[in-house]
Amino acid sequence: MTTLPQNIKEQFFKAIKGDLSLREFEEWLYTDKELERLLNSESHFELIAINFREGGAKYELWKFLKNYIGLQEFEKYKMLELLNEAKQKTERLPYILMEFYNLYCYGYNFLQDLGLGIGLAVEVPRVNNTIAETWNELTSEQQTALSNSFSPELEYCIEQVINWINTDKIILTGEQDELGHYEYQDLRTEEEKKSKLWVIVSEDNKTGFSTSKNLLWEKLKDRK
């Protein structure tokens, strides 16, 4: 099987994700000679035969790409893209944090701190003296203050997850179970699995139930 270089893969990934329009991808396809050299004539013809102006073009593109990469690689790419954009603190940061919360709810438990610990504080704003129930209902001043309050915990949590993925402590498979929950391999140590934001405040030894508090939320609650 032909191995595609990373720069070629990323063009495909961007097109499938929507970061690159299909028209832009098609233009790149006809001007890039490296891909043409890498593919055999049959595969190259199959690729350029895709009608990028039809509704099913992304599906056809993904079906073609699966001959060269696996779901695991694409899922890793998507997750690292989100993490690195969050690290850069673009204007999409609050929505990325809410996406981390959504991904946590759908099975990515390794996002406990980023998703449940921080993302939920954006989804249901942790802001004093406000009746706002969503991020978009906050004033711009409140949004800025809330975003700034996540530091330095946010930066630490982002770097931590990036490290887990890059060192294969967390291996994303891209697969989902029958309930739609994401599956992955967790090779972290028990110490690495411990939350840096959630601490147990009480525990019932008979039932096994425990009560936890979020240290970041406590910090937000104490803000004037």
Image: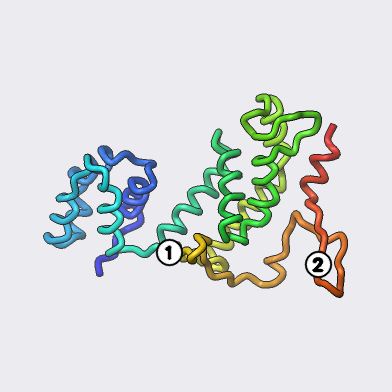
Q: Which residue is mark 2?
A: 209
| Structural distance between the alpha carbons of marks 1 and 2 | 35 Å
- Quadrant in the picture for the C terminus: top right
Q: Which residue is mark 1?
A: 72
In the picture, measured across the screen, residue 8 lies left or right of residue 132, that is left
Q: Amino acid at mark 1?
A: Gln
- Tag 2 or tag 1, which sits nearer the N-term? 1
Pick whichever, 42 or 200, lies toward us: 200
In the picture, measured across the screen, residue 80 lies left or right of residue 155, that is left
For the point 26% across and 47% down, the residue is: 56
For the point 22% across and 46% down, the residue is: 29
On screen, residue 83 above or below 88: below
Q: Amino acid at mark 2?
A: Phe
Does the CB distance between marks 1 and 2 fall below 8 Å? no
Q: Report the number of numbered marks.
A: 2
Q: Position of residue 15 (x, y in %)?
A: 33, 46
Residue 53 location, quadrant: top left
Q: Position of residue 196 (x, y in %)?
A: 74, 57
For the point 22% across and 53% down, the residue is: 34
Q: Position of residue 208 (x, y in %)?
A: 81, 71
Label 1 element class? helix
Residue 39 location, quadrant: bottom left
